[in-house]
Image (cartoon, rainbow, N blue to C red):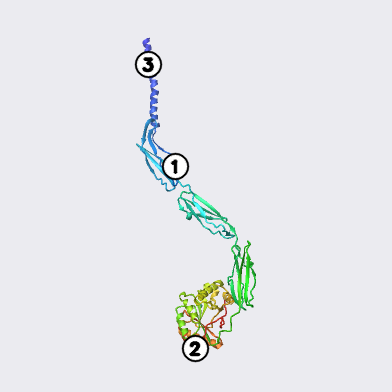
Amino acid sequence: MVCGMAKKRKKKRGIGTLLFMIPMILFLILLAVGFLFLNRREIVIELNGEDTVNIDYGGTYQEEGASAYYHETMIPFLHKNLELESTDNVNSSVPGHYTVTYTASFKDIRTTKVRKVNIVDPIYPEIKLVSDPDGYTPYGHKYEEEGYSASDNYDGDLTDKVVRTAYKDCVMYSVTDTYGNKTTVSRMIVYDDRRGPEISFPQGSAEEEVFVGGSWYNDYYAEDDVDGDVTEAVKVDGSVDTSEPGDYQLTYTVTDAHGNTSETTRLVHVKVRPNNDGAAGEDSKTIYLTFDDGPYAYTEELLGILAKYNVKATFFTTSAYPAYAYCMALEAQQGHTVAVHSATHNYASIYASEDNYWADFNRQNEVIAAQTGSYSNIFRFPGGSSNTVSMNYNSGIMSRLSQQASAKGYIYFDWNVSSGDAGGTTDTEQVYQNVIAGIQACSRAGVPSVVLQHDVKAYSVNAVERIITWGLENGYHFAALQPGSYAPHQAIAN
Ligand SMILES: [Zn+2]
């Protein structure tokens, strides 16, 4: 019985052990599998200091370093410090975004960690505006830029990089530095009208002369910087009586729409015309030799021929060949008349407007005054007063110029004997024949001869000596044109 019982207990105990062992083994398997799956092998890099560092441009950057170790998560006591490699591209002298990269490796593992280093430019560019405290923009005008400059602590002069945007009432200026700092400033535009109109005398000047009995045109023009042409608003105080010699003062007053008043005066001298009975001894046997377009290379030679026969002539001069301007002084010294033809002799320019014509005229008269010591009041229109070429540039201009000339006290001379040297012929014999025939025709008609030649044409100058000797042999006399001389006028055709 006992024995049987013991046997029975023994059998019971073997099963219990087995029941205990199975979960144990399962647990160990699980543990092993868990270890295999859960254990992480890793390298940890720890940066000293912040992951992102901001340094002001101009400051110094000090890298604080880092440390690294290897460990396995399921085996806490396994901890191994590692050496680190680092690279960095930090340039603290240039604002920008940089990195410092740390790398560590152990066995087959390699890890990197990056620190961001920003070289910060905290200073914005500065824009300076040039501005006149008393300046303003007239109403209706565009603002005229007074100037500006831009500079930056890092970029230096940034003026060229300024973006300027003009609006109706203000102008915006923006500039961005290398780091991206953007500065914007604005300028308010001050609109105002503080200036009165400008009164001018387009055809004349503030002081003028007119001969008794002549016609004087009260031309004036007023322009306001805001209102434009305000000529009609001009009030004129005073008048000119051309029948009475004397000095007449005129006062011109005009006020613009904003109440700015301008005033100017003009003095007109009405003078007695110089003796106009014709030059002494002038008759149908008088020959006025006239030479246009010079002085030029043949002028001195011509002066020699004239001097040889003591013949006086008239030179309608230009400034086409400025190197020969000195000949005008010789002409005057030798008793010839130095008169105005044109400074430029450019039809398209001088006949485009009366302004242009008189500006060119005055320019030539200044040259004459410089060479001879006095201005001339004698002139010849380029192309003559009957020219039609001026029609291409300004309709009616010859009529107006001839009126203005007499108002200004200038006397123009056309010609009644043409040598043909301006295009009809290039032959000296033909020039001579043309002139002789013309003089004879004038003589028969009972008027003096005013002969047109050009001292810029050698073949024409070469005919002069024969013309003179022929004239002297045939009872003619030569003279230089004077203000009272016979002045043939061709019919104005424009
Ligand atoms: Zn000419």
Q: Quadrant of the C terminus?
A: bottom right
Quarter assignment of residue 391: bottom right
Left or right of 78 in this view: 379:
right
Mark in the foreground, 1 or 3: 1
Residue behind mark 1:
53
From mark 2 to mark 3, how far is it between C-alphas? 179 Å
**Type of amino acid at the residue the image marks with label 2:** Leu
The amino acid type found where label 3 is placed reads Lys
Q: Provide residue 37's location: percent of width, then percent of height.
A: 39, 31
- Identify the secondary structure beneath mark 1: strand
Q: CA distance from mark 1 to mark 3?
A: 75 Å
Q: Disc 3 designates what residue?
A: 11
User: Percent x, y for residue 371?
Assistant: 49, 76
In the picture, measured across the screen, residue 433 lies left or right of residue 211, that is left
Tag shown at residue 472: 2
Whichever of labels 1 and 2 marks the residue nearer the N terminus, that label is 1
Q: Nearer the viewer, residue 190 or 25?
A: 190
Residues at circles 2 and 3 in contact by the CB criterion of under 8 Å: no
Q: Label 1 neighbourhood size at 10 Å, few (<14), some (14-19), many (20+)?
A: some
Q: Residue 266 shows which numbered tag? A: none
In this rendering, does residue 423 appear at all? no
Dot 3 alpha-carbon crowd within 10 angstroms: few under 14, some 14 to 19, many 20 or more: few
Q: Which residue is painted at 45% across and 80% down in the image?
A: 300
Question: Above or below — where is 174 with respect to 21?
Answer: below
Q: Quadrant of the N terminus?
A: top left
User: Which amino acid type corresponds to the residue marked 1 in the rendered image?
Assistant: Val
Is residue 366 in sight in this rendering?
Answer: yes
Tell which tag, 2 or 3, sits nearer the viewer.
2
* Disc 3, SS: helix
Instruction: Return the x and y of residue 112 as percentages of the image width and height.
Output: 39, 40
